Image: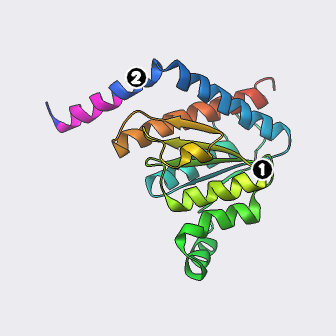
Amino acid sequence: MSKTLKNIQELSNLAAAIANDTKLINQIDTVSEAIVKAYRAGNKTIFCGNGGSSAEAQHLAAELSGKFMMDRKAIPAEACHVNSSFVTAVSNDYDFTQVYSRYIEAFGNSGDVLIGLSTSGTSQNIIKAFQSAKSKGLVCVSLTGETGGLLNELSDYILKIPSKSVPRIQEIHLLIGHIICEKVEQSLFGNE
């Protein structure tokens, strides 16, 4: 079997496992409803991640703030890392583990939703962001790999992907993120 086919089959098998995980599907629906509730209350969604997960965080924030499937009013969503001056200043003046928690301190409000993407669930800058978010009354959602790491204790909702493969976990995170974006958009704007 070629490596290409092996990778495709790994993703297909993982997607099939997710499709049969009623608990995870219900959690995705619950997270979507929590985000809709936040928007209806005038709040926003904030994303954070590192590496490929930061790219996904930025991608999903754009799907919400710009548009996903329908032309509709913009809604506030942003990834913590998009202001490079802020990221480099905080990293220089403090250290990189503080960068997302400082963002939450500056821009997070009670009732906002923080979504952290971390395949390990142990990234210190994500952990500190969740600690800051909890202290400010944000709803904390994490997308992780199979163990959930330290985010188990800090998340109001945790969506754990049953895999140790970073690329496969990230691919499923993006799938779940797109599902959530579609559900949020449909709930908020489906009658327009």
* Tally of numbered tags: 2
Query: x%, y% of residue 157?
Result: 62, 37
Q: Position of residue 168 (x, y in %)?
A: 37, 39
Residue 103 sits in quarter: bottom right
Q: Residue at x 66, y 33 (%)?
A: 31
Percent x, y of residue 43: 81, 46
The answer to whether residue 66 shows anywhere in this view is no
Q: Quadrant of the N terminus?
A: top left
Identified at 45% across, 17% down, the residue is 20
Which one is in front, 39 or 164?
A: 164
Residue type at mark 2?
Ala
User: Element under label 2?
Assistant: helix
- The answer to which of 140 and 63 lies nearer the viewer is 140
Label 1 packing within 10 angstroms: few (<14), some (14-19), many (20+): some
Vertical arrangement, residue 142 with respect to residue 69, above or below: below
Q: Residue at x 29, y 31 (%)?
A: 10
Foreground residue, 62 or 18?
Answer: 18
> Disc 2 and disc 1: Cα gap in Å?
33 Å
Give the magenta range: 3-11
Can you identify the residue that label 2 sits on?
17
Give the number of the disc on residue 137: 1
The kind of residue on which mark 1 rests is Gly
What secondary structure is the magenta-colored segment mainly?
A: helix
User: Taking 75 as reference, is 20 above or below it?
Assistant: above
**Magenta stretch: includes residue 170:** no
